Image: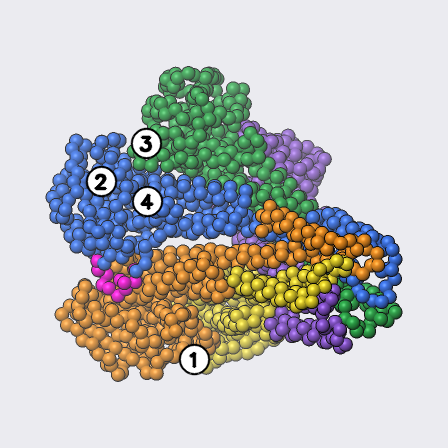
Chain colours: A yellow, B orange, C blue, D green, E purple
Amino acid sequence: MTDSESKRSIKAGLSPGSLIHVGERMVEKVRITVIDYDADNIFEKEVETVEECFRFRETSTVTWINIDGIHDAAVVEKLGTYFGLHPLILEDIMTTSQRPKMEDLGDAAYVVLKMIEYGTDCSDVVTEQMSLIFGRNFVLTFQERPGDTFDPVRERIRKGKGRIRKMGPDYLAYALIDAVVDDYFIVLERMGEQIEEIEDELVADPKKTTLNEIHAMKRQMIFLRKSAWPMRELISRLERAESPLIQKTTGIFLRDVYDHTIQIIDNIETFRDMLSGMLDMYLSSVSNRMNEVMKVLTIIGTIFIPLTFLVGVYGMNFKFMPELEWRGSYFVVWGVMIAVAVFLVAYFRRKKWL
Amino acid sequence: MTDSESKRSIKAGLSPGSLIHVGERMVEKVRITVIDYDADNIFEKEVETVEECFRFRETSTVTWINIDGIHDAAVVEKLGTYFGLHPLILEDIMTTSQRPKMEDLGDAAYVVLKMIEYGTDCSDVVTEQMSLIFGRNFVLTFQERPGDTFDPVRERIRKGKGRIRKMGPDYLAYALIDAVVDDYFIVLERMGEQIEEIEDELVADPKKTTLNEIHAMKRQMIFLRKSAWPMRELISRLERAESPLIQKTTGIFLRDVYDHTIQIIDNIETFRDMLSGMLDMYLSSVSNRMNEVMKVLTIIGTIFIPLTFLVGVYGMNFKFMPELEWRGSYFVVWGVMIAVAVFLVAYFRRKKWL
Amino acid sequence: MTDSESKRSIKAGLSPGSLIHVGERMVEKVRITVIDYDADNIFEKEVETVEECFRFRETSTVTWINIDGIHDAAVVEKLGTYFGLHPLILEDIMTTSQRPKMEDLGDAAYVVLKMIEYGTDCSDVVTEQMSLIFGRNFVLTFQERPGDTFDPVRERIRKGKGRIRKMGPDYLAYALIDAVVDDYFIVLERMGEQIEEIEDELVADPKKTTLNEIHAMKRQMIFLRKSAWPMRELISRLERAESPLIQKTTGIFLRDVYDHTIQIIDNIETFRDMLSGMLDMYLSSVSNRMNEVMKVLTIIGTIFIPLTFLVGVYGMNFKFMPELEWRGSYFVVWGVMIAVAVFLVAYFRRKKWL
Amino acid sequence: MTDSESKRSIKAGLSPGSLIHVGERMVEKVRITVIDYDADNIFEKEVETVEECFRFRETSTVTWINIDGIHDAAVVEKLGTYFGLHPLILEDIMTTSQRPKMEDLGDAAYVVLKMIEYGTDCSDVVTEQMSLIFGRNFVLTFQERPGDTFDPVRERIRKGKGRIRKMGPDYLAYALIDAVVDDYFIVLERMGEQIEEIEDELVADPKKTTLNEIHAMKRQMIFLRKSAWPMRELISRLERAESPLIQKTTGIFLRDVYDHTIQIIDNIETFRDMLSGMLDMYLSSVSNRMNEVMKVLTIIGTIFIPLTFLVGVYGMNFKFMPELEWRGSYFVVWGVMIAVAVFLVAYFRRKKWL
Amino acid sequence: MTDSESKRSIKAGLSPGSLIHVGERMVEKVRITVIDYDADNIFEKEVETVEECFRFRETSTVTWINIDGIHDAAVVEKLGTYFGLHPLILEDIMTTSQRPKMEDLGDAAYVVLKMIEYGTDCSDVVTEQMSLIFGRNFVLTFQERPGDTFDPVRERIRKGKGRIRKMGPDYLAYALIDAVVDDYFIVLERMGEQIEEIEDELVADPKKTTLNEIHAMKRQMIFLRKSAWPMRELISRLERAESPLIQKTTGIFLRDVYDHTIQIIDNIETFRDMLSGMLDMYLSSVSNRMNEVMKVLTIIGTIFIPLTFLVGVYGMNFKFMPELEWRGSYFVVWGVMIAVAVFLVAYFRRKKWL
């Protein structure tokens, strides 16, 4: 799990509201796309300058402005000033180490979420901060990395599927949050599959790498929790907010997303419990197997040690050792040795050590 | 424990309220049964089409429509439209990865529960989602797998035993929830027996499989908790709901089921604690036994090692070794060796190592 | 700890309020005793039939009816009907797997408690369900096993000691609950003594049985908690209940019992913590001792292994081995061997391995 | 930690309010001291009989009666009757197994605290119950063992230092509670030093006794917690109590003691965490060291085992063994053995086993 | 982590409000600096005596008096008396073992914080107590060690950057608290880097020192938590305080710091979880490696033991041992020995022990 939370310290000592991008820069150029729609019409464009978006503000249609690339303080500031956002909000947008949260700005609401997806090498989960502001007739979304999480929503707006075109910016905000939340399900399902694979491996043939995989999964769970728990809280606050921004019909949908976040947290906790159980099981099975091996080896050693002593006895060079002279004694010794070995094996068997 | 929660991701990006079945398809054909009754009359029928049920809605009698097989979106949608249910509720019914919950729909209440029972091979617990909606004069129940959990309730309705025929749909809903909750007791009792068996095994003769059984039980507890905790919450909400749907006389019964869910959770937690204790005990008893074995073996080795050294000494071929020439030295050496062995055994005894 | 909670499943599917005894049957015949008293008079009798008790209901004196043996549905039902109890309450009385709880019935209060005592073999704690109902001028108590927990209360009534004869049924109920709670102290004190004994054993000479004793105590704590925590809750509810049944002067006494339950829980939690610490200590001391043994044995082996190699060298039969011919070489070899042994012992000493 | 909570069971079955001393009897004779003061005058006396104290009650000055020795029921009862205390309060005073608590008696407040100090042998912490009752113009304190915790307060009263002489009994009560709380700091500081010593020992040279010390400290923490947590609660209740007994100016001081109790709990929890960490560290360092030893020893054994085999080969007595006849073979064998040993050592080095 | 909380006990028994410095004395001489400003003017001076500051109190400008060195009771007392502070507050300022807290003094607010930074040797985190009091037109800050945490704030005041010069003492207080909180981010980032280094070491080559480093980090986390959790609480109280001291515009900024403290706590908890995981991983990897070594060594031993026995057999000196006479038997024995060795290796391979 890659978490781009480093470098927050560069802001220490700065005046609050200073716009400095904290996080990794992922794109070269800021990309601004505008979708403006009502039940009947839709206008979609990738604009070059921030100013081009401003004219949409006055219209009564719903305007969704999406910014890919938040490292450019000028863009964020212009947009912020035009839409009347507090400098601290703009600072939060550019500081990608925010904790998911919701703030009621009076005539708008500010939501920070963590989007998650599998990285390019498909083995690690990557989080990215998504800021969403919605007001009376607009929705602004900010993120650094262009992604495809919002594509299904765009598609639904374009095709007028479902009720999205008929409803206001609060419903659009819901749809976007829902899209982010749905990504958690996708990631969790894949994790569930991985956990099952590890479990099968654990039963069939636990290897050293199994341990590392369990630990890696546990670590990912730590980070997932960190993103998911506050998400639940913020959606709950959004649902309960008695804001004129959120219409009653949208409230029902928010409650639905809220249920989803609870399911996500439930799954994360279940996975954590399962991984803990698997770790215990791995450790005890490895130690069991190890013990088994050591026991067998030690038993082999223990059987031969008295025999070796015995043959050592008749390897002594004393002048006077009566047994050496007797004819059958060699065979007698063999007999004794076989008897000792048989006795020991039988004894260990009876003690259930073998 | 089989949990058919996979595939939720196929819904990512879809418009909310899209009716897609998430879960395993268990039956070929949807089976719809209607029971319509009041204190004096009862009518029971397995209908072919959804539309056949509609006429019961207008009657003042209590109508219970049970759907086995929720994979058919058409059936669910028709019923939903007729009974005026929100699309999100219909979506929840078809998505079998819901968390147990209760929603007050104003003129109806929506309850999701997880039914549990032992699978066909009797070794694994299977959960299934049951959705229940009850309104002024109807109760709808939805599930995928036809089961016999509700049979005792049907029997009581048919025979008019108890107060069920004299009371309204809220009492029927209670009776159905109670039937689901009772199944938890059955499963928990069997688990209790299994735990006791494992415990006996643990005391008598802990084996490798004992460990796996403990781990398997612990895992099942994780899943049971996941189903039972929210169940308690939802019944509590149902009981406290100041809805005209729930009559005062039924409230007392709901409180009774609530007490049952607390007992279930209590039992689950007790089982968890016991299993943790058993795991600790297994591990320490195995390691104890292992140590015992290793100690005895090492002691045997330790006794023979000096003796082997001694016989080695007199196996050397030096020309001038006075002892070799003496007549009794062979027997003296034997004496020395026996003395050494006796001393070591005595020493280990005194140190309580043997 | 014996817990007779099995067989609850036989009630699955039954109509609520069905009177079936869930629990072990301990006595052959139901025994009903009546004590009727006011400040001046007292009447005490063991009656044959339930009906004999009924006449006391109308008197203004306090009537305490105690039932030993709750397996007889007829007795419980008659009494319940006469005192106007809800069928669910009667069902709870006969189902001995209840969780301690308190229910306000309006004109009466229903309390379920778990009585504990040491079993006949004095090694195991036995719990038993005690149901108590008190109203305006009566107290009913139900239990299966006849016991002596209530004897001191009876004695106080008979002798008119303390304020019991001057006060109402609420005070009697308090006195009975107090008697049950006092039994917990007795059991906990004995457990405290046992824990101290185990601790002494642990310091002096930890044995295998010590481990089993610790585990057994831990298990008993799990069950004690299960009985004690809800007891605290119910007494708190009783104390705070603004019921006309409970007079103000009795409230102070209830608060006192409440303090006792907190002390009990405190003690249980302390014992749990102590037992966990003792378990850790046992495991580390056993492993320490084991390691000590293995180390010493391995060191003995390690000292002799090079020596055995050396004597082996001069046991070789090569025709040309110059040392064999020299006169003093046997003694030189002995010297070398002693030197090696001394060096190794010194080395291990310096490394603090010995 | 000595906790004199045994024998509580002797009270089981007694009527509530029975005055029986539960605890260890520490002094032969009850000692009663009276201090009576206002801003200008002070009177201090050790009285012989309880009755001597009574006359102070009517005066408007602050009267502090301190009882050392609570085993004498007569003394406690007389005082209680005179000051109008409920029998249950008197019972609580004499039962030294109380949990720290506060009770509002209307015209007085009752506070139970646990005083702690190091025992005479300075290695164990001893707790003692202190009961404090303060009313409109008096403060009563009860304890069994005469101690010096209150001496600084007496000194301040005698010398009129600070504001104590100018203020009422609530301030005196505060000053006494503060003195008890300060003792916790003294004990905790010494424990902190002990923990640091153990830690240094742990880093430098972990011994077997280190483990016992850690366990002993952990156990003491369990008992300290048991005393400190409820103390915080009771002071919080005292501070928030809207009683005419506590003047506003005193409230600020109570809040200060409250802060102190939080600091105490904070320290206890920190110590617990540190001790847990130290235990982990001890166990892993011991096991690390043990493993190191075993590894080195096993490696030594492993190097000699093939060599011993080799010399065994040429100790065989076959008539026809060509190597035995060759002249240089003895030295060749030595060469081979040295080569094998060097190779094994190098191999183990490369594998980082040595 | 150095925590100068010792010596609190020297205050036991003293009258409350006694001004005694509890903590380490870090500077020789108390250093008092005054900054007095409004939007247009600024005056900054290091004064010699406390009295010099007094004249600023009457002005309407914002006055910030910073005291480096709190060991001088006279200075603190004079300032306290002049600004009308309660003796308990002055005592708290001088006692450096306070827990972070906030107190509403009516016409002023008192805030205690713990500043953290890396010590001079850069390996240990050092905490220091900072007391802050702000009223209608002044801010007082107290600390023992002169540090540079507040320098950026001073710079912003001097240069009139941001809104600081235009706002009141509440904003200045916020700016100072923010500066303290920012230091936590700096320390946490460095810890994050250290944790990552340890983790890399853990994967690549776990050494003994790795364990000590993990334990040291865990200990630091215990102390960080102790400072951070109450900090969150106090800022929350400050934000919610409906005090005329805090203006609405400042409230938004306080909420921002509050979010930061939550992020800090989140990070600390995440680090704790990660460190626990790393400890587990270290222990299991070390034990895995150890087991691997022991297994290989034991296997080598086990292969040679039967061979050594075999050569011992033919080293016996019996007169009559037919094999010794046969010509090829030496080579046959070699063959047998090689066969045994190959068989054992193959067997161990097949069992996956090698």
Q: Position of residue B142 (x, y in %)?
A: 32, 73
Q: Residue A161 shows which numbered tag?
A: 1
- SS label for mark 1: loop
Q: Cβ–Cβ below 8 Å for labels 3 and 4?
A: no
Locate residue D289, reporting x and y percent. 67, 53
Callout 2: chain? C
Secondary element type, mark 4: helix
Q: Which mark is residue C169?
A: 2
| Mark nearer the viewer, 1 or 2 | 2
Indicate the amino acid at tag 3.
Gly
Q: CA distance from mark 1 to mark 3?
A: 77 Å
Kindly check if marks 4 and 2 are in contact, taking CB atoms under 8 A apart as contact. no
Name the residue carrying label 3: D17
Q: CA distance from mark 1 to mark 2?
A: 70 Å
- Residue B260 placement: quadrant: bottom left
Magenta highlight on residue C132: no
- For the residues labelled 4 and 1, the Cα–Cα distance comes to 59 Å
Going from the N terminus, do you reach mark 4 or mark 2 first?
A: 2
**Vertical side of D78 occupied by A192: above or below:** below
Name the residue beneath numbered marker 4: C235
Chain under numbered label 3: D
Q: Which residues are magenta?
A: C8-19
Q: Left or right of D308: which side holds C245?
A: left
Residue at x-position 46% and y-position 43%? C195
Dividing the picture into quadrants, the one containing residue E214 is bottom right
Image-based side of B274 in relation to C85, left or right? right
